[in-house]
Image (spheres, rainbow, N blue to C red):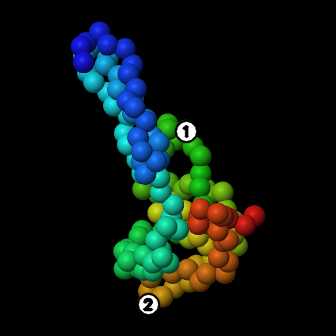
Amino acid sequence: MSANSETTTAAPRSEADNDVTESVLTGAEGVEVQSPEFQNFSPHDSPSHANEISRFADIKVTVSAELGRAKIPIQRLLSLGNGSVLALDRTIESPIELIAQGVPLASGEVVVVDGCFGIRITKVYPRNRKGESLPVE
C-alpha cells in the first residue's frame, strides 16, 4: 500500500468470524493502522464459569478503613506539621468505611484486636449488577 492510499476495507469474513470487517488506514507519515480483530465473548459460554472464580480465591487485595475526609487548600496542606490537627467530615459516632481496592464494601465500628485497630462489620453494602458494592445512605 502506498503512502497516499485512502481507507480500504477487506472483504467480509466468514460467519464463524462474526462477519467482522477490517479497515486498513495509511496515515500521512506512511504508518499503517489496522483495526483489531476480536472474537465475540459471552461470560456464560463456559460450563465451568462458576468454578473459574475459585482460581482467584487466594489473591490478596488491599483493604483499608476510612475514618473520614477533609477538603483543604494546598497551602493549608503544605503547612501541616507535627501537632497540627485536621478535622474530618465524620463524627466520632459515625461508622468507619471498609474499602477494598477502592471499592466500598462495608461499614463498621473501630475495635482493638491484640493492641491493633480493627473493624467490627455492622453493615455489608449490596452489590450492583457489575458486582460492585453500593454504599447504603
Above or below residue 77? Residue 40 is: below
The amino acid beneath tag 2 is Asp
- Locate residue 109: give its quadrant: bottom right
**Residue drawn 49% across the image and 67% down it:** 45
- Locate residue 108: give its quadrant: bottom right
Q: CA distance from mark 2 to mark 1?
A: 38 Å
User: Quick check: can you spot residue 62?
Assistant: yes
The amino acid beneath tag 1 is Pro
Quarter of the C terminus within the rendering: bottom right
- Please state which of residues 95 and 87 is positioned toward the viewer in this rendering: 95
- Please state which of residues 92 and 67 is positioned toward the viewer in this rendering: 67
User: Quick check: can you spot residue 107?
Assistant: no
- Locate residue 56: give its quadrant: bottom left
Q: For mark 1, does the 10 Å Cα neighbourhood hold few (<14), some (14 to 19), or many (20 or more) residues?
A: few
Asked if residue 25 lies left or right of residue 125, the reply is left
Which residue is labeled 1 in the image? Answer: 73
**Residue drawn 59% across the image and 46% down it:** 71
**Residue drawn 58% across the image and 70% down it:** 105
* Residue 131: image tag: none
- Please state which of residues 117 and 33 is positioned toward the viewer in this rendering: 33
Asked if residue 83 lies left or right of residue 3, the reply is right
Q: What is the x, y in percent for residue 65?
A: 53, 69
Which residue is labeled 2 in the image? Answer: 114
Q: How many marks?
A: 2
